[in-house]
Amino acid sequence: MNEILLPVVVLGVLGFLFATLLGLISSKFKVETSVTEEAVRNALPGANCGACGYPGCDGCAAAIAKGEAPVDACVIGGPSTTANVAKAMGVEAVANDNRQVAVVKCNGDCDSAKDMFEYSGLTDCRAQIALFGGKKECNYGCLGCGTCENTCPFDAIHVHNGVAKVDRNKCVACGKCVAACPKDIISLVPYSQKAVVLCSNQEKGKDARKKCDKACIACTLCAKTYPEGFEMKKNLSEEVINNDLDPELLQQAADKCPNSCIEVFN
């Protein structure tokens, strides 16, 4: 009987000693936080997404409380979070409509973009690039493996028919999909932007068209139709970032595109 009780007693005593020791160490090295920092932390959404550039909401709260970050440092919280953080800091929140949204600059779905071969392997865009550069003939095309989709913590991007599409209402511009895309075809644009060119191919028009039926072929029709809304750069049409553009004229320019690679937002 003693042979059974002795180990139990020893383990119990050791457990108590270690618990006491850990408690003392925790108390000794506890990092004190100010009342302001705690109030700011409580005002943040708690997503810990890192989109603010700090290590989670704790890091963001500490930076704001120290004056090292602005009250609108949380990019996913929106105006309500900014207002609550400003209240916790005892300052007035300044209205700043700087919301952004992610855009996948590719429209080459399975029906339009040509593949060099059929791929069966890891469903990760980065793995495709690392192994053989990707299956698509277009070097600027979305691979459609869903790496961005798996990375997004807000369920705002999904692959449809071989190309990633962003839900503008769910996207909070955290930038995780931008960092995850090995093709560098995802970018953040102002939410107020009324149109985007869904192509990134900078090859000459005839070469781009051979690889994708929805590629921009640099025909310049959009820029000629509405020069204030579109400009040509490196064999590629690009939308002009301007909140004052006329939606009707943008739509007219989009309708002129022979390959339907311009999207106009309502």
Image: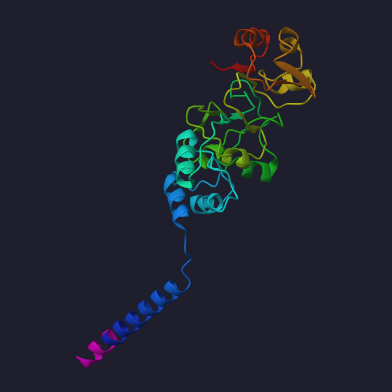
The image quarter in which residue 257 lies? top right
Q: Determine whether, in the image, residue 240 is placed left or right of residue 19.
A: right
- Residue 120 in view (yes/no): no
Secondary structure predominantly adopted by residues drawn in magenta: helix
Q: Determine whether, in the image, residue 220 is placed left or right of residue 27.
A: right
Q: Which residue is pictured at 41% across the width and 77% down the height? A: 24
Place of residue 93 in the rendered image (x, y in percent of width and height, measured from the top left): 51, 36
Residue 222 belongs to magenta span: no
Place of residue 191 in the rendered image (x, y in percent of width and height, measured from the top left): 57, 26
- Residue 66 in view (yes/no): yes
Taking depth in this image into account, of 35 and 263 the one nearest to the observer is 35
Place of residue 236 in the rendered image (x, y in percent of width and height, measured from the top left): 75, 22
Taking depth in this image into account, of 74 and 124 the one nearest to the observer is 74
Q: Determine whether, in the image, residue 187 is placed left or right of residue 18.
A: right
Taking depth in this image into account, of 233 and 259 the one nearest to the observer is 233
Residue 6 belongs to magenta span: yes
Q: Which residue is pictured at 47% across the width and 43% down the height? A: 85
Q: Determine whether, in the image, residue 216 is placed left or right of residue 180.
A: right
What's the magenta region?
1-8
